[in-house]
Image (spheres, coloured by chain):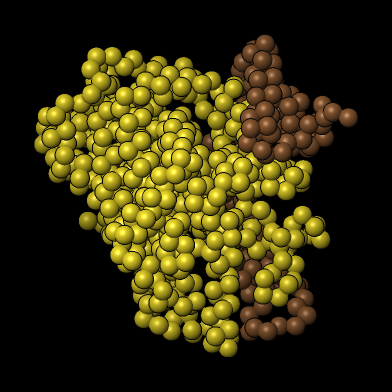
C-alpha cells in the first residue's frame, strides 16, 4: 500500500517536474538540444519506474512505532530549530541547546546532557574558530 | 615518465609532514567511524569532507585525508563485527559470521589481529592493482568521445541498479532523484534558470556539501535513533593478542584469492565492499569447507571477507580516477570533492593532475601501513572508544555537520535545506530506496547532461550518434545485460 501511494506521488512529482521543464523559455539556442530534454527524460523515466512500482509493490515497510515516530519528529524539529537559530543564537549557545534536547531524546539525564552541551558548544567553537580558522557565529556572545 | 618513476614522485609528495599527519588522522578516525555500528565509510567521508574544505586543505591533502578515512572504515568495521556481532559497516557483515564465534571461543585477540593482517594484504593487492591498471585504463579512456561517455555513465547506473538494493526499480528511482537534484540551478549551455523558484540561493544549484551532509549525516542521526544496539554485551579481549605463524600460513591462500577477487569486483562500477566480501566468503566456503567449520569460527572464513572488502575499496578508486565515473557512493563523494576544488575528473586527470593522482595512490600505501600498526597493537584503544554513548555522539555529529555546511556560504538557507534533504533521505531509506544511487546521480547529473548535449551538437541533433561507435554499442549492450541479468538469472534458477 505504501509503495502504491508513493508511486502515485511520484507520478504527480514527475508530471510537475516535466511540465516545469516544458515551459522553460530559451531566448536563443546555439545547440540542437536545449535545457529541456534532459529533465524531460528524467521525468519520463520516473513515471515509468513509478508505474512498475505500482504494478509490483514491495511488502509494507517497517514504520516505527508511534512513540518512536514522536521521538523522530522531536529530533527533526530540534535539527530544524538548530538550523534556523544557528546564525542568530551563535554556535556555542545553539549547539548547547541542541545537545541538551538531542541527548535527552537519546536517553541521557539532564546533568549529563547539560555538561555535554557546554563541552561541545565551547570545545568545538574553540577548535574550529580559534585553532582551525573556520569562522563560526557567536550570536549574542559576540563582544561589542 | 614511467609508472614507477611517477609512483616514487608521488611517494615524495605524500611524505610531507602535513600529508603524513592527515593520513594518520584519517586512518584513526576512519577505523573509529567504521567500528561504530551504523556509521560506515560513506558517513565518515561525508562528514569530514566539508571540514577538510572549510579548513582550506589543498586538494591533494584533502583527498589523502578522506581516502585514509575510507580505508580506515574497512578496517574498523570488523572490530564491532567480531566483538559485538554487530557489523560496523556494510562491508563487515560477513566478518561477523566467523569472527564472532571465534571471539566466543576466547580467540578475540587472534581474530582481531589476523583480520587486521588480511585487511592489510587486501589493501596492498588493491594498491598494486591500481598502479598496474590505472594508467592503462586512463590511456584507453582518452579515446572516449561524448557519446561513449554518456553510454559509460548509463552503464554505471545499470550496474548499480542490478547490484545495490533489493528492488532495482527503487534503485533506479534513487538515481533519477539524484539526476533531478543536479538539474537545479542555472543551465550552463543557455543561461536559463531551472527549478530555482526565483530564489537566489538556488541559482548556482544545490551545493554538493548540502546534499552529502543531508543524505549521509542527518538521515543517519534519525536511523541511529531507531537502533537498539544498546544492551549488547561487548566481548572481553583476553589471552593472546597476536595470531601465530601457522595461522597466517593456513589462511594465506584464502587471503590472496579473496584480495584478487575483491579488487576485481571493486573495479566494476556499482559493486563495492559488501558484495566483494559476500562473494569471496561464499567462494572460500565452497572451496574449503569440507568439515563444516565455516560459520563456527573458521579463521579462513574470517580472513576472506576482510581481505576482499579492503581490496574492493581500493578497486573502487580505479574507475573514479581513470574514467571519472565512480563505482560506489563513497567514491562518488570523493569525485565530488574533486569538483569542489575545480578539478575536472575524467581520463585527463592522470595527465593533467599527475601530482594529485600519484600522491593519492602513494598515500594508500602509507595509510595502510599506519592502519596495520594501529590495528595490531592499538586495537584496544578502539575497543574502548566503541563505548562512546549515542547521547554524546549524535549531537557531536550534528554539530560538526552544521559547521561544515555553514562554512561554505554561511547561510541559514543551506542549513534548513540540508535538514529537509535529511528527512527526505530518511523517508527514502524507510522505503528501502538506497542512497548511493542518489549521490551518484547528483554527482554525475551535470556531466551526463553536458556529454549528451555535446554529442548531439556534434551530430546536429541526430540521436543515432549515441550508438555510433563500436565502443558505445558495446557499452549499451553491457548496460542492457547488467540491467536484465539478475531478473534473468532468477528466472533460470527458478526453473531447474
Extreme residue in the right direction: A144
* Towards the viewer: B460 or B402: B402
Left or right of residue A116: residue B31: left
Image location (x, y in percent) of residue B93: 36, 36
| The quadrant where residue B98 appears | top left
* Towards the viewer: B119 or A143: A143
* Residue A109 appearing in the image: yes
| The quadrant where residue B80 appears | top left
Quadrant of the image containing the C terminus of chain A: top right
User: Which residue is located at x 56 percent, y 79 percent?
Assistant: B454
User: Which hue is chain B drawn in?
Assistant: yellow
Q: Is residue B191 above or below residue A118?
A: below
- The count of marks equals 0
Image location (x, y in percent) of residue B398: 63, 33
Q: Is residue B34 above or below residue B157?
A: above
* Towards the viewer: B33 or B103: B33
User: Which residue is located at x 47 percent, y 19 percent?
Assistant: B387
* Residue A8 appearing in the image: no
User: Which hue is chain A drawn in?
Assistant: brown
| The quadrant where residue B416 appears | top right
Left or right of residue B90: residue B104: left
Q: Is residue B446 above or below residue B90?
A: below
Image location (x, y in percent) of residue B266: 35, 53
User: Which residue is located at x 38 percent, y 41 percent?
Assistant: B367
Q: Is residue B31 above or below residue B361?
A: above
User: Which residue is located at x 69 percent, y 43 percent?
Assistant: B407
Left or right of residue B184: residue B435: left
Image location (x, y in percent) of residue B438: 55, 53
Amino acid at each position: 500500500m505504501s509503495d502504491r501511494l508513493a508511486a502515485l506521488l511520484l507520478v504527480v512529482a514527475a508530471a510537475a517536474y516535466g511540465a516545469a521543464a516544458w515551459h522553460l523559455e530559451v531566448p536563443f539556442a546555439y545547440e540542437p538540444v536545449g535545457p529541456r530534454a534532459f529533465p524531460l527524460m528524467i521525468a519520463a523515466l520516473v513515471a515509468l519506474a513509478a508505474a512498475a512500482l505500482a504494478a509490483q509493490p514491495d511488502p509494507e515497510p517497517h514504520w516505527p512505532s508511534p512513540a518512536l515516530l514522536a521521538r523522530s519528529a522531536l529530533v527533526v524539529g530540534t535539527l530544524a530549530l538548530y538550523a534556523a537559530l544557528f546564525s542568530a543564537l551563535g554556535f556555542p549557545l545553539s549547539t548547547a541547546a541542541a545537545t541538551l534536547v538531542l541527548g535527552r531524546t537519546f536517553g541521557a539525564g539532564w546533568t549529563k546532557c547539560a555538561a555535554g552541551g557546554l563541552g561541545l558548544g565551547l570545545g568545538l567553537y574553540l577548535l574550529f574558530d580559534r585553532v582551525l580558522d573556520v569562522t563560526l557565529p557567536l550570536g549574542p556572545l559576540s563582544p561589542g | 615518465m614511467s609508472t614507477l618513476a611517477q609512483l616514487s614522485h608521488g611517494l615524495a609528495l605524500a611524505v610531507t609532514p602535513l600529508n603524513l599527519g592527515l593520513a594518520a588522522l584519517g586512518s584513526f578516525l576512519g577505523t573509529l567511524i567504521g567500528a561504530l555500528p551504523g556509521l560506515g565509510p560513506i558517513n565518515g567521508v561525508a562528514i569530514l569532507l566539508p571540514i577538510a574544505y572549510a579548513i582550506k586543505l589543498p586538494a591533494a591533502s584533502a583527498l589523502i585525508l578522506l581516502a585514509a578515512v575510507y580505508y580506515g572504515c574497512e578496517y574498523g568495521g570488523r572490530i564491532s563485527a567480531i566483538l559485538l556481532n554487530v557489523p560496523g559497516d556494510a562491508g563487515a557483515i560477513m566478518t561477523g559470521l566467523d569472527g564472532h564465534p571465534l571471539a566466543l571461543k576466547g580467540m578475540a585477540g587472534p581474530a582481531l589481529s589476523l583480520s587486521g593482517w588480511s585487511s592489510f594484504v587486501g589493501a596492498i593487492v588493491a594498491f598494486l592493482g591500481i598502479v598496474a591498471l590505472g594508467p592503462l585504463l586512463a590511456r584507453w579512456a582518452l579515446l572516449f568521445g561524448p557519446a561513449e561517455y554518456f553510454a559509460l555513465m548509463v552503464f554505471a547506473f545499470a550496474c548499480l541498479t542490478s547490484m545495490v538494493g533489493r528492488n532495482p526499480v527503487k534503485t533506479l528511482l534513487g538515481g533519477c532523484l539524484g539526476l533531478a537534484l543536479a538539474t537545479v540551478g542555472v543551465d550552463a549551455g543557455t543561461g536559463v534558470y531551472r527549478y530555482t523558484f526565483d530564489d537566489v540561493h538556488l541559482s548556482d544549484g544545490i551545493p554538493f556539501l548540502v546534499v552529502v551532509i543531508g543524505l549521509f549525516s542527518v538521515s543517519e542521526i534519525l536511523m541511529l535513533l531507531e537502533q537498539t544496539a544498546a544492551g549488547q554485551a561487548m566481548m572481553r579481549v583476553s589471552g593472546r593478542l597476536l595470531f601465530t605463524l601457522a595461522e597466517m600460513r593456513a589462511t594465506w591462500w584464502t587471503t590472496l584469492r579473496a584480495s584478487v577477487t575483491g579488487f576485481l569486483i571493486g573495479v566494476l562500477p556499482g559493486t563495492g565492499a559488501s558484495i566483494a566480501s559476500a562473494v569471496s566468503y561464499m567462494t572460500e566456503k565452497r572451496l574449503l569447507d569440507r568439515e563444516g567449520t565455516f560459520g563456527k569460527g573458521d579463521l579462513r572464513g574470517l580472513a576472506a571477507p576482510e581481505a576482499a572488502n579492503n581490496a574492493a575499496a581500493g578497486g573502487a578508486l580505479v574507475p573514479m580516477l581513470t574514467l571519472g565515473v565512480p563505482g560506489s557512493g563513497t567514491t562518488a563523494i570523493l569525485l565530488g570533492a574533486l569538483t569542489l576544488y575545480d578539478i575536472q575528473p575524467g581520463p585527463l586527470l592522470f595527465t593533467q593532475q599527475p601530482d594529485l593522482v600519484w600522491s593519492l595512490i602513494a598515500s594508500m600505501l602509507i595509510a595502510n601501513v599506519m592502519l596495520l600498526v594501529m590495528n595490531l597493537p592499538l586495537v584496544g584503544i578502539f575497543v574502548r572508544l566503541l563505548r562512546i554513548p549515542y547521547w554524546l555522539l549524535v549531537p557531536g555529529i550534528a554539530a560538526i555537520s552544521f559547521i561544515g555546511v555553514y562554512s561554505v556560504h554561511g547561510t541559514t538557507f543551506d542549513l534548513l535545506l540540508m535538514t529537509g534533504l535529511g528527512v527526505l533521505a530518511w523517508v527514502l531509506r524507510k522505503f528501502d530506496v538506497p542512497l548511493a544511487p542518489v549521490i551518484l546521480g547528483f554527482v554525475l547529473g551535470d556531466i551526463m547532461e553536458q556529454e549528451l548535449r555535446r554529442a548531439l551538437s556534434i551530430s546536429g541533433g541526430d540521436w543515432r550518434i549515441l550508438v555510433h561507435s563500436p565502443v558505445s554499442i558495446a557499452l549499451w549492450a553491457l548496460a542492457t545485460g547488467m540491467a536484465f541479468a539478475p531478473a534473468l538469472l532468477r528466472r533460470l534458477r527458478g526453473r531447474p
